[in-house]
Amino acid sequence: MSDRLCTLSDDYSMALRQYVSNQDEAALARAYELGRKALEDGLGVLDVATVHSRALPALLLRPLHEHEHAKLLEALEKFLVEALSPFEMAFLGFRESNVVLHRVNDVLEGQARRIGSALHDEAAQLLASVHLALADLAVRQPGTAKPVQGVRGLLEQIEDRLRNLSHELRPPILDDLGLVPALEFLADTISKRWGVGVAVHATLDRSLPATVETTLYRIAQEALNNVVKHAKATQASVCLRRESHKVACSILDDGVGFDAAAVARRSGARGLGLVEIQERVVALGGALRLGDNDGGGTDLTVEIPLE
């Protein structure tokens, strides 16, 4: 038993005996304080339950009349419930925070969809108008053909960049065709732009909830950005699979590997995008694992429950 658990056990047994003897509000408040202290020390509900069970024999083995025994059981239950109440409050707060975070993510995705659409549609229309104006200028002023051609080249570069930004914000293919085609498009874009080969392997028997698909796409997007910027990798893969009541997504690369100490030092500056990934996973009640890839490099895996 750890030192913290031993201390809790001693304090809990003493407080419980005092409450059984007096059953006043001050003694009951001590149960709440012990539960709060246990929560702060990183102990869990099972630890408190274990401590409670170890304190019971000394109290239950005493000879008691039937009505006294019933009163004792009621007091023991009340004390335990009070000791566990900080954990319930923390859980409710955590659940409410997840709901808020989930809603914020939905709002941000909606904004990204609108901005991406504006970049793709409205900006494209404006650039098309500029192309027409340049074509008209070249006809009216034949001597401007060469400069106009140079300006057209710059406009085409702007169009390519706007198109890439639009897809990075919110790829239309994600809404139109679903997660797997969107990941394949993302992989192809990264391969062409950065020269890192990215393969997508997916085993899904049916579509996923829209929120889960968006979250997994964003996680893969952020993780692959890390690969091309930090990992010095030549190959990467995105493996998506459905397992019973959850979906798992792994992003693996053959780069320099994962330095836990370096990531910990950078976490305060939100380095490597891991904080954003963790927040998205936690918002859906999932889990994140980050470690070494068996073939060298890094393995980032997330699991999200579907029920």
Image: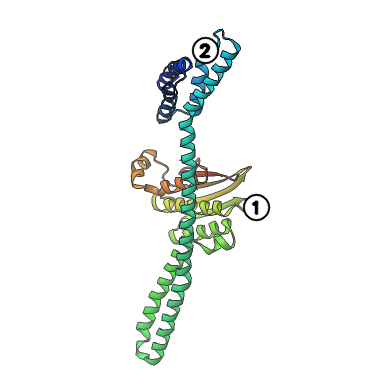
Label 2 SS = helix
Picture disc at residue 169: none
Along the horizontal axis of the image, is 65 left or right of 25? right
**Residue position marked by numbered label 1 in the rendering:** 206
Image coords of residue 26 (percent x, y): 41, 23
For the C terminus, the image quarter is top right
Q: Nearer the viewer, residue 4 or 173?
A: 4
**Tag 2: amino acid:** Leu
* Label 1 crowd bin: few (<14), some (14–19), many (20+), radius 10 Å: few
Disc 1/disc 2 C-alpha distance (Å):
56 Å
**Tag 1: amino acid:** Arg
For the N terminus, the image quarter is top left
Nearer to us of marks 1 and 2 is 2
Q: Residue at x 42, y 67 (%)?
A: 161
Give the vertical position of 248 relative to 41 (above or below).
below
* Colour approach in the figure: rainbow
**Residue position marked by numbered label 2 in the rendering:** 59
* Label 2 crowd bin: few (<14), some (14–19), many (20+), radius 10 Å: some
Give the vertical position of 122 relative to 106 (above or below).
below
First in sequence: mark 1 vs mark 2: 2
Q: Are marks 1 and 2 in contact (CB under 8 Å)?
A: no
Q: Residue at x 47, y 36 (%)?
A: 89
Image coords of residue 120 (percent x, y): 47, 69
Q: Nearer the viewer, residue 49 or 155?
A: 49
